[in-house]
Image (cartoon, helix red, strand yellow):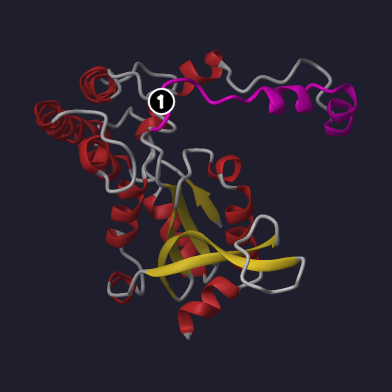
């Protein structure tokens, strides 16, 4: 199981929004120190309301009204935390941007008649968002905590990779790293003690694109940094350098290497060396 830039443990991940906005160590700072302190307070309030909402017996029942604490949480999160953090105009999915992702190529591809026919998607055109579905799920979907689901998969022995592009704000790498360090499972202590390892992919480049060193070959293989990872047994976390929320779109070569090593088991073999 691989989860990319996911929101898995909201009550933990929300705590890291302020640091990600102010001093993430990876993405541009999008707030000043005064706003950072306001975000810290808003994050604490959001976490308190999330935990209060979790305790309500009706929180998961979509047929009943949303509990007051959950509605309050939704307001505090969206207005006092997310809204204030992104007031500068930064893109919540890629903090380097002040405009939306350009998904025009994806739109064109998935709306081609031959592609829609192959997928059996002939009823309506492809659209990246469906506000009706989003409204029906939020904020219950945001509140969902998947800790027990991850624990179940880990206990089964299946391999689990959590990865996050380090330019994403909404599901940032700091929060994802934090919950992977804190989740309780059979090898929690061993996982927390593991060193951070650099992952590199290989890329074939032409000699014209590479520095001339007197070598007569037309091509050479160079290392391409993918990111930093840690892991133990069947659990790993990877921070992907220079990628936003849609890491494979931003870093196709690097994330293909990540997927290949995950699927063929090389990623976990390297942890045993």
Q: Is residue 99 magenta?
A: yes
- Secondary structure under tag 1 reads loop
Q: Is residue 69 magenta?
A: no
Q: Left or right? Give the position of 196 relative to 212.
A: left
Q: Residue at x 54, y 55 (%)?
A: 2
* Between 257 and 123, the one nearer to me in the picture: 257
* The residue positioned farthest toward the bottom in the image shown: 273
* Between 166 and 7, the one nearer to me in the picture: 166
Q: Residue at x 47, y 83 (%)?
A: 272
Which image quadrant is residue 120 in?
Answer: top right
Q: Left or right? Give the position of 139 relative to 222.
A: left
Q: x, y (%) of residue 22?
A: 21, 36
Q: x, y (%) of residue 268?
A: 52, 74
- Callout 1: 10 Å neighbours few (<14), some, many (20+)? many
Q: Left or right? Give the position of 51 relative to 214.
A: left
Q: x, y (%) of residue 98?
A: 41, 22
> Which residue is disc 1 drawn over?
91
Q: Quadrant of the N terminus?
A: bottom right
269 relative to 73, above or below: below
Q: Residue at x 64, y 55 (%)?
A: 256
Residue range of the region highlighted in magenta in the rendering? 96-119
Q: Left or right? Give the position of 128 relative to 40.
A: right
Which image quadrant is residue 90 in?
Answer: top left
Q: x, y (%) of residue 109?
A: 78, 27
Q: How many marks?
A: 1
* Between 87 and 58, the one nearer to me in the picture: 87
* The residue positioned farthest toward the front in the image shown: 214
92 relative to 270, above or below: above
């Amino acid at each position: 199981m691989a989860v990319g830039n996911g929101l898995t443990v909201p009550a933990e991940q929300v705590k890291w929004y302020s640091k990600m906005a102010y001093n993430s160590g990876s993405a541009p700072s999008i707030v000043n120190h005064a706003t950072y302190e306001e975000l810290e307070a808003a994050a604490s309030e959001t976490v308190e309301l999330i935990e209060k909402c979790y305790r309500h017996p009706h929180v998961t029942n979509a047929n009943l009204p949303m509990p007051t604490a959950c509605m309050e949480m939704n307001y505090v999160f969206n207005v006092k935390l997310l809204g204030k953090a992104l007031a500068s105009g930064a893109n919540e999915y890629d903090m380097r941007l002040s405009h939306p992702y350009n998904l025009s190529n994806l739109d064109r591809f998935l709306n081609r008649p031959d592609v829609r026919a192959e997928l059996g998607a002939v009823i309506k055109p492809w659209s990246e968002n469906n506000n009706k579905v989003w409204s029906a799920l939020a904020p219950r979907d945001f509140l969902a905590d998947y800790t027990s689901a991850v624990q179940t998969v880990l206990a089964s022995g299946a391999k689990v990779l959590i990865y996050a592009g380090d330019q994403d704000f909404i599901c940032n790498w700091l929060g994802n790293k934090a919950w992977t360090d804190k989740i309780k499972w059979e090898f929690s202590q061993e996982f927390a003690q593991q060193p951070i390892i650099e992952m590199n992919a290989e890329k074939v480049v032409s000699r014209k694109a590479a520095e001339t060193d007197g070598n007569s070959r037309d091509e050479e293989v160079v290392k391409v940094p993918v990111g930093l990872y840690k892991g133990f047994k069947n659990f790993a976390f990877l921070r992907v350098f220079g990628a936003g929320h849609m890491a494979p779109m931003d870093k196709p070569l690097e994330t293909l290497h990540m997927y290949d090593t995950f699927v063929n088991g090389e990623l976990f073999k390297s942890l045993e060396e």
